[in-house]
Structure formats: structure tokens, C-alpha cells
Image: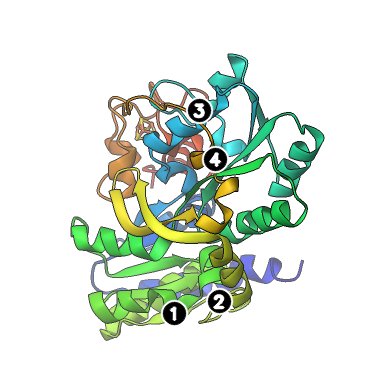
Amino acid sequence: MKFVDEFRDPELGKRLVDDIHRKADKHMRLMEFCGGHTVSIFRNGIRQLLPSTVEMLSGPGCPVCVTANSDLDKAIALAKVPGVIITTFGDMLKVPGSTSSLMQARADGADVRIVYSTLDAIQIAKDNPDKSVVFIGIGFETTAPGIAASILQADAESVPNYYVLSQHKLCPPTIKALLDLGEVKLDGIVCPGHVCAIIGSDAWNFVASDYGIGCVVSGFEPIDILKSIDMLIDQVENGSPAVEIAYKRGVTPAGNTYAIEQLYRVFEVAPADWRGIGIVPGSGLVISKKYEKYDAEKNFDFDPGPTIEPKGCLCGDILRGVKTPLDCKLFKKACTPDSPVGPCMVSAEGTCSAYYLYGGGDE
Ligand code: SF4
């Protein structure tokens, strides 16, 4: 299959691994920002193929995992409002909030439906004119343009009972916040391919220029990731941090300017609460005043109650790259994919889930 087979070519993979072993003389710490990369790295056994000098850390790039309990509690509280239908992507259903989850709310009688796109959510609103349909808008720059488009569509088609609870997050401000925290010293970042397809690789220029850390935008196949690591090693060994693209079939320096334009027709930049990191200025998106009649937060009375963090769960530390699932006493014991304690075990892109499924720590 074009654009797939050549990026899974074992011979090319072996050459890249040999190249990495030959070049990586000194110890370096690289972070893959994106949960999709974490899963691909584990699924393809890439950590086991790397020399001991190349340490890989998983970053905060899983939208479900970084959604703070305070935000999850809002979605769960909204589900309990009479006459509300919650629509959401499936991953969100099992994520535990402070005292409940959307799945528990559904078991208790709330109308919570899994959808595969916002088009489904708008259709549900059209089919249920006497109900209020709220779409839980989570995700990064990748999903936000589509959700902006759904609000524009609701407006154009006069669908008055469609709302979005916007919990979107922006990636570059969060990397800045992580670097400013200074808890983890990084030598390079494997940047998120899907996010960069929208915002472009130029959005990461500050990481190289202000922090002296190299960035390579990667695709999701094993060759993409090995190539990105190889390029980062070149940057580290040559002392020349830069922003490069190893995913040229999907990403340009400027990104998708049309999608960005649609996004900012509807959303405004605002602070956002990231699990494990806290409030990061300029890292979230709220619905602008012009479209506030579609803003669930502004149009319903609901009380999410006090925020309670799951006891013993280290998701926050794992998302900052300072701990791994192996440091968590609950990993594989009280916390498994069937009975998750924290979001990093629930999400298909979560680090705990990847460690659990692909034997992280067995390398
Ligand atoms: S193993 Fe479970 S409890 Fe521990 S950090 Fe991961 S999600 Fe949280």
C-alpha cells in the first residue's frame, strides 16, 4: 500500500538502526511529544532497537490523558442536566473524573452517546429538537478545526440545540511550559505529525532558537520515527539544534492555513488546565463571543463539584516525563485497561496503556 509499505520496510529500518548505533556516541534524552508516537514506538519495539545512549521519554501529547479532572467533571455534570444528550469520542467514556465517569453517568441514566464525528452530533441535534446536544470538544490543534467547522455548520443550518464544551489544547505553549519547569533536560523532541499538519513546523522554531533543543516532525510509521530519531542524533552530535521535517508527505513549515483560519473564526486563545502541569497561559481554546450561543459552558447551569485526584496515580508526573508507569505502585495491579485508575491507562494513546500492552520496561 502506497505511503505505508515503504515506511515499514525492514531493510530500510535495519539500515537506520545501524546508522543510529554508529552515530549516537554520547547520552541523549529525546522526548516523543505525541501519544500516537508513544504507541508506535512500543508497538514496533523501537526502544529495544536503540543504543543505550539514546533515552526516549514519553510526553504529554495524549489529549484524553491531559484533560484535567476539573474538565472531566464538567462533562460528567453536564450529562446529568435534564434534557441534555452528551456526544463524545469513545475514548472519553471510561476516563475517571473525580468521583464518576461518563460511562458511570450513562449507567445512572444519562444520555451519553459515542459519535465518530461532529457531523453525527449535529444529526443527533436535528433528530432531537426538544433536547440539547452537547459535544465534548477535546483534542489538540488537529481536531479543533473540525469542531470549529461544526459550529459554523450549526450556525449556517440554524441548529439551535447544538453546543460544544470546548476543552481543546494547544501544543507549543505546553512544551514551553514544560521546558520552563526545568524538571527534565531534553536534547531533542520528536514533534507531533498530525498537529504539525495543521500548525506547521514553524510553530516549534522557538524550541530550537530559545532553548537550543532540536525538533524533528515525525510521521507514525516505524521508518518515520527511526528517521526522526536519526535526524535528531545528527543535530545533537553536531551541536546544531534546528526544526526539521521527517514527515514531508503530511507537513509543511506553514501548515494548513485554511484550517487555522477556520479554527480562529470560532475559537479564541485562553489559559487551559493540563493534568500534571496545571494552568498554562495561552494553551487552550474557548468559543468566541460571536458564537457563544453554542458554548455549553455559558448556556447551562451545572456544578462539577470539588476536584479530587485519583489516589496513588502518577499520570501527572508521567505526562511531564519525570516518571514512568513502572514507578507507579498501581501499574498492572489496581490499574489495568479493564479497571483503569487514571487516564493514561484508559486512552489508546496513553503511556500506561502502551507499557501495559507492549511490555514497557521489559527492554
Ligand atoms: S498505572 Fe494507572 S494509576 Fe498508575 S499512573 Fe498509570 S494510569 Fe495512573
Mark 4 neighbour class, 10 Å CA radius: few under 14, some 14 to 19, many 20 or more: many
Q: What residue is shown at x 43% (from left), y 30% (from top)?
A: 73
Furthest residue toward left: 182
Mark 3 neighbour class, 10 Å CA radius: few under 14, some 14 to 19, many 20 or more: many
3 vs 4, front mark: 4
Quadrant assignment, res 143: bottom right
Give the structural element (helix, strand or loop) at label 1: helix
Give the number of the disc on residue 76.
Answer: 3
Give the number of the disc on residue 9.
Answer: none
Which residue has dot 2 on it? Answer: 255
Furthest residue toward top: 108
Q: Is residue 295 visible?
A: yes
Q: Amino acid at mark 2?
A: Gly
2 vs 3, front mark: 3
Give the structural element (helix, strand or loop) at label 2: loop
User: Which comes sooner in the sequence, label 1 or label 2?
Assistant: 1
User: Which comes sooner in the sequence, label 1 or label 3?
Assistant: 3
| CA gap, disc 1 and disc 4 | 33 Å
| CA gap, disc 2 and disc 3 | 35 Å
User: Which comes sooner in the sequence, label 2 or label 4?
Assistant: 2
User: Which comes sooner in the sequence, label 2 or label 3?
Assistant: 3
Q: Amino acid at mark 1?
A: Asp
Give 265 or 88, whichever is nearer the viewer: 265
* Residue 193 vertical placement versus 95 (above, below): below
Which residue has dot 1 on it? Answer: 202
Q: Where residue 116 sits in the image (x, y, percent)?
A: 70, 44
Q: Where residue 210 sits in the image (x, y, percent)?
A: 25, 78
User: Which comes sooner in the sequence, label 1 or label 4?
Assistant: 1
* Residue 171 vertical placement versus 63 (above, below): below
Which residue has dot 4 on it? Answer: 296
